Amino acid sequence: MIQVVALDPGYGNTKVCLNNPDGQGMKSVLLQSAVARGRNFGLAGIGMRLAQQAIPVQFSGHDLLVGPGAWNWNTPENNLDFSALTSPGRQALFYAALAQALDPGTYEVGNLVIGLPVPLLQDETQADAVMNALKAYKGSHLFVVDKNEYRLTIQRVKVLPQPVGAYADWLISDELQMRKGSSQAEIGVLDIGQNTLDLYALQGGKVTPRFVGGSKLGVRRLIDLMDGSFAGRDAVETDAALRSGRIKPAQIHLQSWLGEIMGAVERVWPNLRRFTAVIPGGGGCLLLGDLLRAALAAHGAAVFTPADMVMANAIGLWKYAIMMQRKDGGSDGNL
């Protein structure tokens, strides 16, 4: 039995964290969120080495390629609408990430915990549609990843805001012990993914609605500012090149993007000094690096940098779900 699988379905990277089936510790996986349909080009590659391979995934009549290199085989899916979170492509990414953590076989999962972006959850109409579609994850799954077959049964599905993960990663150690002196700490989480900027505040494990907000100012906005700087690459490929350092954004583009982000932060958090710590997370925060930390510090923030800014949400959601199971069954938010 796998107690908990945590899924952070980012638009830039798909992140999964789960406990080992033997119950000893956890493992986490990051997979580039690129999806394409395979293309048959006959014998046009005869005698040649093929471009970077992608991961083939088959399930329920779908035959997709995911992960790094998917863009070499066909035009990648690039839908940044929140409805894309429940598409077959997102499901294929989830399966492929799981397959990197598990041997082929049959598995029972007690809880699948899915982190959703704050701007989505603030729009109740869109959020209801997405969460209703996510109910399909509950139940039995049969899928093939890279010719290996997996059977999965998920007993419960639970939704949480993505930034709760970074907070829980700060709050709970890898040994599942609570941080000393954390009961009254007021924490602000600033998460920048490919699609959104999420702002979230918690004190003593309780959300503070006054300091919750977000907007579509993720890495996508930096790519817009860099228009013309990436020589015909698709946005998905550009995002991967940015994160890997193969493309270096100019300082003027980073500063412009940072200015928009700090403007959004100030509207939701007018005084950063009130927080015990501000936690930056997500690939966008990694891209901005010291520029963001310096800007936050200049506004009075005590910045706490996670050990892994990209994986912090997934790891923290896993920790949080495990702790809630031990405490009270963790029924709140189940679909």
Image (tube, rainbow, N blue to C red):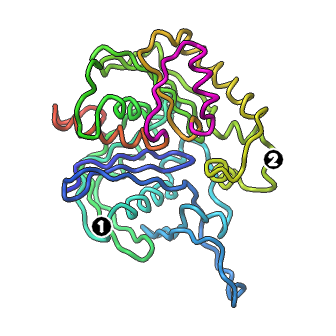
Could you say where residue 267 lies in the image, as x and y percent from the top left?
A: 60, 14
* Residue 287 figure quarter: top right
Q: Is residue 325 left or right of residue 147?
A: left
Q: Residue at x 24, y 62 (%)?
A: 107
- Residue 22 image offset from top left, x and y in percent: 19, 59
User: Does label 2 or label 1 sit earlier along the sequence?
Assistant: 1
Question: Which amino acid, by three-letter code, is at mark 1?
Answer: Arg
Q: Quadrant of the image for the C terminus?
A: top left
Q: Helix, strand, or loop for circle 1?
A: strand
151 in magenta: no
Q: Which disc is residue 151 wearing?
A: 1
Report the magenta residues as a range. 286-309
Q: Quadrant of the N terminus?
A: bottom left
- Separation of marks 2 and 1 at Cα, in angstroms: 44 Å
According to the image, label 2 marks what residue? 229
* Residue type, label 2: Ser
Neighbour tally class for label 2: few under 14, some 14-19, many 20 plus, Cα within 10 Å: some
> In the picture shown, does residue 80 fall above or below 164?
below
Which residue is found at the position 52% from the left and 22% from the top? 213
